[in-house]
Image (cartoon, rainbow, N blue to C red):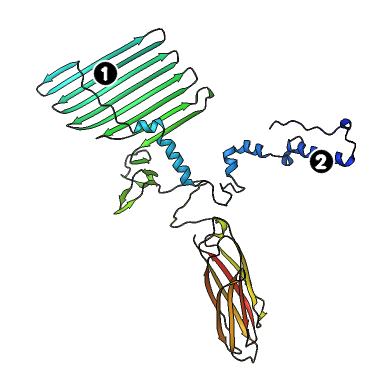
Amino acid sequence: MANNVVPQIPDSAGVSDPATRRVLQAITEVLRVRNGDVGKGENAFLTRAGLEDLLGSDNFNMLTEDATPVSPSGQRRVRMADIIRDLQNDIAGSPLYIQLGQAIDMITKPTTGLLARVGRSELYLQNEVVQRINDGNAFYQSSMTQWSQTGANVAAIRTELTTTTSQAGATASAVTTLSSTVGANTAAISLNLSTQATINGYLGAQFTLRFDVGGRVSGFGFSATNAGAAGASSSQFIVRANTFAIGGPGEPGDPVGTLDAIPFIVRTQSFVSNGTTRPAGVYMPAAFMGYFVADAGHIGNATVDTIKIAGNAVTIPVNAFQGAPITLTSTTQDLASVVVTYAAGFAPQKVVVLFSFRTVPFGGAGPGELNFGLRRNGNGIYGGSISVLGGYASAPAGGAPDDPGVGTHTYTLYALTNTIQMDAFDGQLTVLGALR
């Protein structure tokens, strides 16, 4: 980053008051550090603008310290579903995608070039050349049409080669079309190659192979362009088909349909497998990724080295244990306490609070009643009682559901007795977040 050096305050600046001079000098030092005039290596100052330059403004605005895109509320600002939808819209609106879905122009019957006719059968071979030229333009097109017909059944091939130049640029294209027709039904294939260059620096090249079967068009293509004089290039490879798969090369003796040889399968429409309708999507027997992001998912069986779940939202227990004895009285005594925090956007719908503790009445004490319960933030969420006999230990245990919502919450296990003296110990309290 280029910065203007902030000078020191010279004696000739005319600032005579010592306090004012110290303040101005402190401000100057801050500016010198901010501008990178001082501070080297790990001590170098990095501004927000500088960080944006390093990351790119979009990435900078979306990242937190753990590289997770978030909003001020704590949720990811952009869902993967939104990104995928934007990508789909971009692709669906691209010229290559649109062309791959357009019907093939059918070959017309030649009017000249008859080779033979016998009864209901005809053969044609037509060659055409079109030339146009002047001081500013040159156009040349050669075409060949091969036609065979018996009654209403037609097989045809047409190839067109075109070159065009002008003072603004140059274009070359080659189109080959094959079609077979029986009655009103036609199947056709069209191969199209083209290149283009203009004087403003634009370059483009495209290859498409389309299949038109009864009006249903599929195919694949590749296009590459730049942005003109800027020279920034982009390219697309698009497949429009019900199934797209990548398989290994064929070898002699390979069994047909070996799954290991087809590691990547895309289905663009739902399909039936083992009597069950499966959704469109990507199907892979195995995948190896360094990093992935998903809005939702289902894993049947997983091995995870380290897992982090935002905001204690899902099955993350928080536990407290108090082993030391506590003498119970007629007022509530806290036996164990835990604190949990649920972030905005990640609070669980329910939590389960589990508790247990043990008691031993003092020797000789008569029968009595033991009361206990749970509080959240000072408010009771559960209460119970049991009868105890002198000299006999007891171990109350239980649990209660709760809906704490967003924020920091303190759960407390308490007990008291009015009629018998006893100690309580081994108090245990566990808060478990449920699925949100």
Q: Earlier in the sequence, mark 2 or mark 1?
A: 2
Q: Position of residue 47 (x, y in %)?
A: 68, 39
Q: Which mark is residue 26?
A: 2
Instruction: Specify whether 422 is left or right of 206.
Output: right
Determine if residue 262 is in view: no
Q: Position of residue 143 (x, y in %)?
A: 28, 17
Q: Position of residue 85 (x, y in %)?
A: 44, 42
- Between 71 and 209, which is closer to the camera in this rendering? 71
Instruction: Specify whether 72 is left or right of 130.
Output: right
Q: Position of residue 351 (x, y in %)?
A: 53, 66
From what the image shows, is residue 428 above or below residue 18?
Answer: below
Instruction: Specify whether 119 is left or right of 198.
Output: left
Residue at position x 54%, y 59% in the image: 347
Instruction: Specify whether 410 is left or right of 175.
Output: right
From what the image shows, is residue 291 above or below residue 414?
Answer: above
Task: Say how many tags the image has.
Answer: 2
Dots 2 and 1: beta carbons under 8 Å? no
Give the Cα separation between the discs numbered 2 and 1: 84 Å
Q: Quadrant of the N terminus?
A: top right
Q: Which residue position holds label 1?
A: 144
Give the image quarter of residue 323. Answer: bottom right
